[in-house]
Amino acid sequence: MIRAEDRGGLRVLTLDRPEKANALTGAMLEALCAAVETARADLEAGRGARVLVLTGAGEVFSAGADIAEARAGLATSPLWERLSAAVADFPGLSIAALNGSCAGGAMGMALACDFRLAVPGARLFYPVMKLGFLPQPSDPARLRALVGPARAKRLLMAGEKLPVEEAEGWGLIDALVPGEALLATAEGFAADVLAAEAGHARAIKEMIEAG
């Protein structure tokens, strides 16, 4: 249910469970973790794609955790944090190409990316307060860094379903893109990274994060 495809210097990982709004099972999370970690290892070995793109099949990026598995314990699994940490640690450029709404635990991987693109009409929401769970450990700090504390509380505490059009104004979404142009736009964002020497993107990211 996770498809991997190399497109030039991009490695595209696609959540492929559209009949269930790409709700993530434990097996899918494991596969995503392994795929991102492999992409990092390949790039560090000098043979992999320099750009990682996360997207989904169908009209929803991801509804978060599969409901049945969430009730059985997946909602608090350490796999969510492992995944977002792997995305954040990717030494090249990472892009979330949101083909539709993004909810719950799936927000973690989007927040961990360097850029977030989204189709018009999508929504972002993270209903941990309503469901009685805490967010993934690293998510609140990443969200605060992007949008500030008050807006982070609106998403995490007030249960706001945020239209991506408003999220772009917050700085949470970097560009609104028609669905058919998502990957082409991602390639455009990645052009300078793909043209640069290997390791240059990592060096710049480390300088930004150190500041």
Image (cartoon, rainbow, N blue to C red):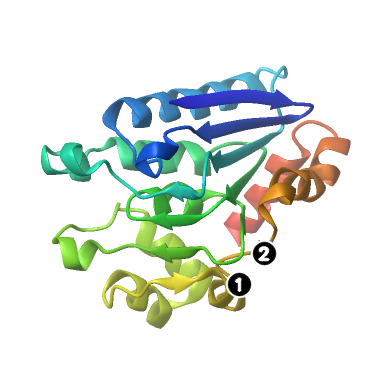
Q: Is residue 190 left or right of residue 172?
A: right
**Which residue is the extreme one toward the right?**
195
Q: Which mark is residue 98?
A: none
Q: Say what amino acid the circle numbered 1 marks.
A: Glu
> Residue at 57% across / 21% down in the picture?
41
Q: Which mark is residue 168?
A: 1
> Residue at 18% across / 36% down in the picture?
69
Label 2 or label 1, whichever lies nearer to me, is 2
* 118 vs 75: above or below: below
- Which quadrant of the figure contains the N terminus? top left
Spot occupied by residue 75 in the image (x, y as percentages of width and height): 21, 45
**Which residue is the extreme one toward the bottom?**
150
Spot occupied by residue 103 in the image (x, y as percentages of width and height): 37, 56
Decide which of tag 2 and tag 1 comes sooner along the chain.
Answer: 1
Q: Which mark is residue 176?
A: 2
| Tag 1 secondary structure | helix
Query: Can residue 199 be seen by looking at this rendering?
Result: yes
Q: Judge by depth and name the residue closer to the eye, 117 or 66.
A: 66
Q: Say what amino acid the circle numbered 2 marks.
A: Leu
Spot occupied by residue 15 in the image (x, y as percentages of width and height): 48, 35
Q: Judge by depth and name the residue closer to the eye, 206 or 201.
A: 201
Q: Judge by depth and name the residue closer to the eye, 82 or 67.
A: 67
Q: Is residue 125 left or right of residue 191?
A: left
Asked if disc 2 and disc 1 are in contact, CB closer than 8 Å, the reply is yes
Query: Can residue 196 be seen by looking at this rendering?
Result: no
Q: Is residue 125 left or right of residue 71?
A: right
- Which quadrant of the figure contains the C terminus? bottom right
Callout 1 crowding tier (Cα within 10 Å): few <14, some 14–19, many ≥20 = some
| Tag 2 secondary structure | strand
> Residue at 44% across / 73% down in the picture?
162
